[in-house]
Amino acid sequence: MPPIGAALHFPANAYHPGRMNVATEILKTPKPAEYNRVELDFRTPMPHPKVRGMAIDYHSHLFAHRQMPAWQEANRHFGIGAFVTMTPLEEAVRIKRSLGERVQFIAVPKWGDAGPYWVDDWLRRLEAFYNLGSRIVKFHMAPLTMVMRNYSFEHAGVQRVIKEAVSRKMILMSHVGDPDLWYQTRYTDTAKYGTRQQHYEQWEAQLAEHRDHPWVGAHLGGNPENPGRLQQLLDTYPNLHLDLSATRWMVREVSIRRDAMRDFVIRNQDRLLWGSDQVSGDQRGFDFLASRLWCHRKLWETAYIGPSPIYDPELPEDRQPVLRGLAMPDEVLQKIYHDNTVTLLGKYGVHFG
C-alpha cells in the first residue's frame, strides 16, 4: 500500500473481471521528482565550504528578480555567498540593487534574437552591462546555438563584439562544444552542425589571436570527457581559465573519470573557477535549486559514492549516474571556490563585497 498521503490513481478502465488483485495494479505511489530521485532531504544542514571569504558561484543564471527568494534560500543553505550571473539586461538593475557587490554580471545578448539587427543590439547591451560594472562577455558557441543564430566565431558580427570587448578590457568567455553523448545523438548531421574538431579549431584560432587577453572556457572547456584535450588547451594558451559548471554533465563525466579528473583539478588548481550553471525559474523552488548545489558540493568536496539525486535524461533508467566525489584538498577548494575568481576578476576592477 502507498504511504499515508500518497496520491492514488484510479484509471477509468482499471477494473477487469477475473483479476485477482486489482488494488495492487491500480494503487501507485507518486514518481519521485526528477531532481530528487532518491528522496533526499535537501534541508538537512550541511557545513559551509571550508573557504576564507565567500564561496563564489562564477557561472549562474539568475533570470529574474522575482525568482530571488528561492535562489537566496538555497544558496544560503549551502554556503554560497556571491554570484557571477548571466541575467537579462532588463532584470539586472533590480537584482544589483538587491545584492550589491555580491552579484556581478556577464554581458550576454538577448537570447533567441536572430533578427537583422542582433549585432547592434548586442553591442548596446554590452555597453549597458559594462556601465553596470560587468567586465565579462559570453559567447555561446554550442552547435545548436550556432545553427539557430547562423553564426560562429568567424562571423563578422561576432568579431565586432569580440573587438569591442577587448578594447574595453573585458574578459572573454565562451561555451564551446557540448556533451559527447549529444554529438552521438543530436549532432550526427555534421553538414548542419559541424564536428567537435571543427568547433575547437575555430575556438583555438580565437585563443591564439587573443593570446594576451583572458578567456574562460565554460563547462570545463565543453569537453570534460577528454582531460587530455583540456590539458593541451591550458598548456598552449596561458590566458585560458576553465570553469567547472553544469551539474548533470559534470556528475556524469567527472565521476566516470574520477581519478583522472582529480589529478587534473589538482594540477590546474590555479586556473579553474567553480560554477554551478544554476538556472532560476518561476517553477524552480528550493528543492530543485538545492539539488544542483548538493551535487556540486558532494562532487568536489567529499568522497561520497552513491546515486545522483538528479535524473539524467541522456542515460536509460537502469544506467543512471553514480556520483563519485573527488574529495579535493582544502587548499584547492579555497582556490576554485574563491581565490581564482577574486584574483581574475579583480584585475579588471570587479570586486565582491
Image (tube, rainbow, N blue to C red):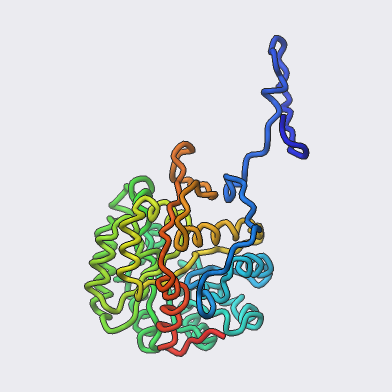
Q: Residue furthest right?
A: 5
Report x, y in % for residue 347. 40, 88
Q: Is residue 51 above or below residue 244?
A: below
Q: How many marks?
A: 0
Q: Is residue 91 left or right of residue 265?
A: right
Q: Is residue 322 left or right of residue 279?
A: left
Q: Is residue 262 above or below residue 183?
A: below
Q: Residue furthest top?
A: 18
Report x, y in % for residue 280. 59, 64
Camera-side residue: 49 or 254? 49
- At a point 40% along the width and 82% down the height, the residue shown is 344
Q: Is residue 40 above or below residue 151?
A: above
Q: Quadrant of residue 199?
A: bottom left
Report x, y in % for residue 196. 28, 57
Which quadrant holds the N terminus?
A: top right
Camera-side residue: 279 or 255? 255
Q: Quadrant of residue 72?
A: bottom right
Report x, y in % for residue 205. 24, 72
- At a point 49% along the width and 61% down the height, the residue shown is 296
Q: Is residue 158 left or right of residue 76?
A: left
Q: Is residue 25 left or right of residue 154?
A: right
Which quadrant holds the C terminus?
A: bottom right
Q: Quadrant of residue 230?
A: bottom left
- At a point 38% along the width and 88% down the height, the residue shown is 169
